[in-house]
């Protein structure tokens, strides 16, 4: 496994570890559980993003950006901004776990 | 004005003066609201813009330490000769706003889009914020962090809506932070005084134990 593959694997693991954290924050912010439980944090080309099925995209947009009669509840933007820095720790932790498994620190 | 209130007022002022035109009105002002106004009002006032403060973030990467000295306590009191105020370096914050525009007419929507792109450029944006005394003005960095177009059908009619995520840099002094976090311990009410200052009303409905 070369360094790029190792990094990508660590980022995928970091995304998996962030998914329950994102869901908890969304639930705490009042997003409905049937929407939140279909959302995941995923990695694509080195970036993390929030993924959800197309059939709930309209509801997600209405929650995130609001509607003419409801205010925005901007959990996706806040979460992504919060984890621009925080992700480094989770990434490092995942990276070390993988590297340890490969015997890199032996 | 103080932290957040000053930026709120500055942003609303910054968005004032937008107009659109159509065959019925050559100049139609675009109203700006904080939060979400009553639906009954907005139905009659399309197009309009709403401002929502969606996040307040400590910007640790801009934090510096040390003491600052000036003669007007960061623009909050009138300067007095030989009087100097000292305070710790302020805590930097980012204030994140969602600015949303709503229009029924596609030409209104396009006119608003054009004017908003000028007010919120991709880079070099700034917001003019006055100090509490109104004696000095600071130009705060302002960033367009995101834009989404979310047109929809509402009540069988098209509704053109756009959402801008805008970040304004700000700061709060430790003194301001302490004041914001202080808790009221006691409230003293004099129920029998006959010397009521002008503009105030005596409290008459309280009973013992209130």
Image (cartoon, coloured by chain):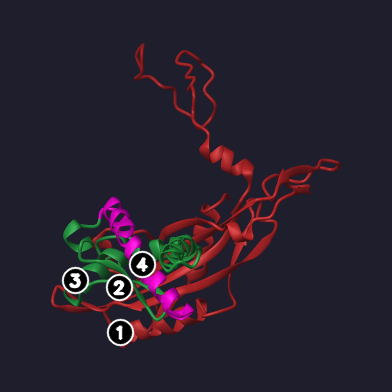
Chain colours: A green, B red
Q: Position of residue B186 (x, y in %)?
A: 48, 22
| SS state under label 2 | loop
Viewer-proximal residue among B178 and A43: A43
Q: Are marks 2 and 3 on the same chain?
A: no
Viewer-proximal residue among B110 and A88: A88
Mark toward the start of the polypeptide (4 vs 3): 4
Q: Which mark is residue B191?
A: none
* Residue named by callout 4: A13
Give me the chain letter of mark 3: A
Q: Are marks 2 and 1 in contact (CB under 8 Å)?
A: no
* Residue named by callout 3: A56
* Residue named by callout 1: B24
Residue in the picture at 63% in, 51% down: B132
Residue in the picture at 48% in, 70% down: B15
Viewer-proximal residue among A56 and B75: A56
Q: Is residue A18 left or right of residue B134?
A: left
Q: Which segment is the magenta one?
A: A1-30
* Residue named by callout 2: B46
Mark 4–mark 2 Cα distance, whole angstroms, equals 47 Å
């Amino acid at each position: 496994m070369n360094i790029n593959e190792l990094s990508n694997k660590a980022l995928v693991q970091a995304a998996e570890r962030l998914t329950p954290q994102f869901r908890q924050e969304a639930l705490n912010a009042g997003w409905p559980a049937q929407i939140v439980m279909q959302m995941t944090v995923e990695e694509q080309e080195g970036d993390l993003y929030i993924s959800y099925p197309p059939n709930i995209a309209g509801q997600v947009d209405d929650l995130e950006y609001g509607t003419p009669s409801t205010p925005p509840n901007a959990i996706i933007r806040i979460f992504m901004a919060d984890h621009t820095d925080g992700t480094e720790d989770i990434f490092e932790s995942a990276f070390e776990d993988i590297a340890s498994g490969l015997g890199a620190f032996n | 004005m103080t932290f957040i209130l000053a930026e709120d007022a500055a942003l609303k002022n910054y968005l004032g003066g937008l107009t659109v035109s159509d065959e019925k009105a050559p100049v139609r002002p675009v109203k700006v609201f904080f939060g979400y106004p009553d639906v009954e009002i907005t139905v009659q006032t399309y197009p309009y813009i709403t401002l929502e403060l969606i996040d307040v973030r400590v910007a640790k990467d801009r934090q510096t330490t040390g003491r600052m000295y000036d003669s007007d306590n960061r623009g909050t009191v009138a300067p007095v000769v030989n009087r100097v105020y000292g305070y710790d370096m302020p805590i930097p914050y980012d204030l994140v706003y969602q600015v949303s525009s709503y229009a029924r007419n596609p030409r209104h929507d396009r006119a608003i889009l054009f004017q908003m792109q000028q007010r919120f450029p991709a880079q070099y944006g700034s917001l003019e914020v006055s100090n509490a005394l109104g004696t000095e003005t600071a130009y705060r960095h302002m960033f367009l962090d995101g834009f989404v177009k979310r047109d929809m059908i509402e009540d069988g009619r098209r509704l053109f809506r756009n959402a801008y995520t805008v970040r304004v840099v700000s700061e709060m002094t430790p003194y301001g932070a302490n004041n914001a976090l202080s808790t009221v311990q006691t409230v003293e009410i004099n129920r029998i005084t006959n010397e009521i200052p002008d503009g105030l009303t005596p409290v008459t409905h309280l009973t013992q134990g209130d």
